[in-house]
Image: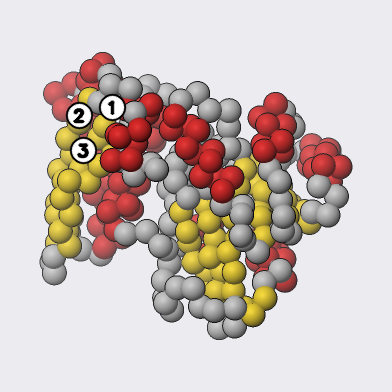
Amino acid sequence: MKSGFVAIIGRPNVGKSTILNVLINRKISIVTNKAQTTRDNIKGIYEDSDYQIVFVDTPGIHKPHHELGRIMNQSALSSTYDVEAIVLVVDASKPFGDGDDYLVSELKPKCPLIIVINKIDLAKIDQVQNLKNKYLSLFREAEIVEMSALRLFNVDDLLKIIKSHLNEGPRYYPTGSISDRDEQFFVKELVREQVLMQLREEVPHQIAVAVEKFQNKSKAVVIEAIIIVDKPSQKAIVIGKDGTRIKALGIKAREELEERYNKRVFLQLYVATKKDWMNNPRLLKEYGYK
C-alpha cells in the first residue's frame, strides 16, 4: 500500500473545503461563501485498494487581525511540514493580489507543490493563463491543475498527480475511517455553518459553538449547544425577534444532523456573550482553538 499526508492550503474562500469533500466523496468540511469558514485543520481520509491519503484541510491564510486569526494562520502553515505533498488552491476568478503575495511570502515548501487553479468556470482563459504564468514564475517546480471542484472537473487528474508523489507506507487510520475528528466537532461545525449561511455579514465571524451535551442513543441523538458571541447586540441578532432566527438556525442544523446520523435529532441551542473571546487565550483553548 502507498500512503501519506497531503496539506490543502490557500487564501480564504478559494474552495479548499469543497476540494477535500469531493476528493473523499464525503462532507467533512463545512462549505459556505464566507471567507474564513474553516478555522481548524481537519483531516479527511481517502482510501482505495492501493492507497490511503490523509488530506489536511486548513484555514485560509490571511493577514491576522486578532489572536484567533494568528492561530488559524499558524495552524495552516504548520500543516505543510512533514507531508508528502502540498496542494495550494487559487481562485481563478481573482487576479493575484496582496493577499496572495502575503501567502507566497509565508509558504516555504519542502516537498512537491501542486497548484490548483480552482473555479475556472468563473474565469476567462487569459485570467487563468496569467495566474499560471505568475505562479510558475514563483514556484518553478510546481505542477498545475486547472479545476472546478463544484463541477467535478479534473478532480481525477488532481488525485492522480497526488498519488504519483506517494511511497510505500502504513495504513495511518483503520479501514473505513473518514476523519480524525470526533462527533462533537462535526456538531459544532454544522451549527456554525448555519450561522454563517443565515446571518450573512451581520455577525458570523465573531461566533463560536460549544457542545454542552451529546448523547447518541439507539433511536435518537440528543444535543445541547451554545452559540458564543462577542457582544450583547450580536446575541439579539442571533436570537432574532421572538426567537425566530435561532429557531430557524436550529431547524436547518437539525436537518443536517439527522441526515448525518440517519435518526431523529433533538437539538437545543442557546446563546451566550463572551466579550473579546477571539483574543482570550483561555476561551480560545476552551472552544477548541489551540
Query: Total number of numbered labels?
Result: 3
Residue under pointer 1:
229
> For this view, does 151 lie left or right of residue 289?
right
Q: Amino acid at mark 2?
A: Ala
Res 25 visible: no
Task: Tell me the residue at 25%/64% (across/down).
Answer: 262
Q: Which residue is depicted at the point 23% across and 18% down?
A: 232
CA distance separating discs 3 and 1: 10 Å
* Residue on which disc 2 sits: 272
Looking at the image, which is closer to me, 150 or 130? Answer: 130
Residue 156: percent from the left, percent from the top? Answer: 66, 66
Label 3 and label 2: CA atoms lie apart by 7 Å
Residue 290: horizontal and vertical position, in percent?
Answer: 39, 43
Mark 3 lies on residue: 226
- In the image, what residue type sits under mark 1? Val
- Could you tell me which secondary element the residue under label 1 belongs to? strand
Residue 128 in view in this figure = yes
Asked if labels 2 and 3 touch by Cβ distance under 8 angstroms, the answer is: yes
Of the residues under marks 3 and 2, which one precedes in the sequence? 3
Name, please, the residue furthest toward the front.
282
